[in-house]
Image (cartoon, rainbow, N blue to C red):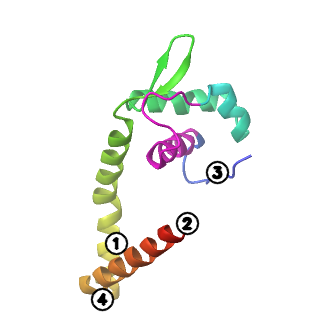
Amino acid sequence: MTDFRQDKAIYLQMAEGICDEIISGKYSPGERIPSVRELAVYLGVNANTAVRAYDNLSLQGIIQTRRGLGFFVTEDAKERILQARRLRFMDDTLPELFRQMQMLDIPVEALAEKWDEWKQNSKISNEKA
């Protein structure tokens, strides 16, 4: 069973999890994803909650149903997810980050320095993996 956060509907968290798996390459374009029942059992949720998650993903054009076969990742799913998340990041996350930076008097150069440091450490970590 998965621990879900209290600040967001479970079906939305499930949909985000599937999106994360698509972005990471676990599911490729055209590939079948778990059935509603499989997902519900795996995550320990009601099947209706899994249906809502899949309905949400279908409405976004991330998955599609093939009658009698199940749900499949659309060809442009990864780009749709990245585009939506980039927009959400730019509209929601960055303004809050900038507000905090201004309040704490953190110069943008310090942010750039941390970004470069993070990229370097991330590159090293990926090479070890």
Evaluate if marks 1 and 4 touch, with contact meaning CB atoms under 8 Å apart: no
Q: Residue at x 69, y 52 (%)?
A: 3
Q: Residue at x 52, y 45 (%)?
A: 21
Alpha carbon distance from label 2 to label 4: 37 Å
Residue occupied by mark 1: 97
Instruction: Estimate the x, y position of residue 113 in percent, counting from the top left.
Output: 31, 84
Which element is circle 2 on?
loop
Determine whether 121 is above or below 53 in the image: below
Q: Nearer the viewer, mark 3 or mark 2?
A: 2
Residue occupied by mark 4: 105
Classed neighbour count for the residue bearing mark 1: other residues with Cα under 10 Å, few (<14), some (14–19), many (≥20): few
Q: Amino acid at mark 3?
A: Phe
Alpha carbon distance from label 2 to label 1: 31 Å
Q: Quadrant of residue 104?
A: bottom left
Residue occupied by mark 3: 4
Alpha carbon distance from label 3 to label 2: 28 Å
Q: Considering only order in the chain, which callout, 4 or 2, is on the residue closer to the N terminus?
A: 4
Q: Nearer the viewer, mark 2 or mark 1?
A: 2
Q: Amino acid at mark 2?
A: Ala
Q: Residue at x 69, y 49 (%)?
A: 2
Alpha carbon distance from label 1 to label 4: 12 Å
Which element is circle 4 on?
loop
Determine whether 63 is above or below 69 in the image: below
Range of residues picked out in magenta: 11-33
Q: Is residue 128 left or right of residue 59?
A: right
Q: Quadrant of residue 11?
A: top right
Q: Quadrant of residue 30?
A: top left
Q: Mostly what secondary structure, the magenta segment? A: helix
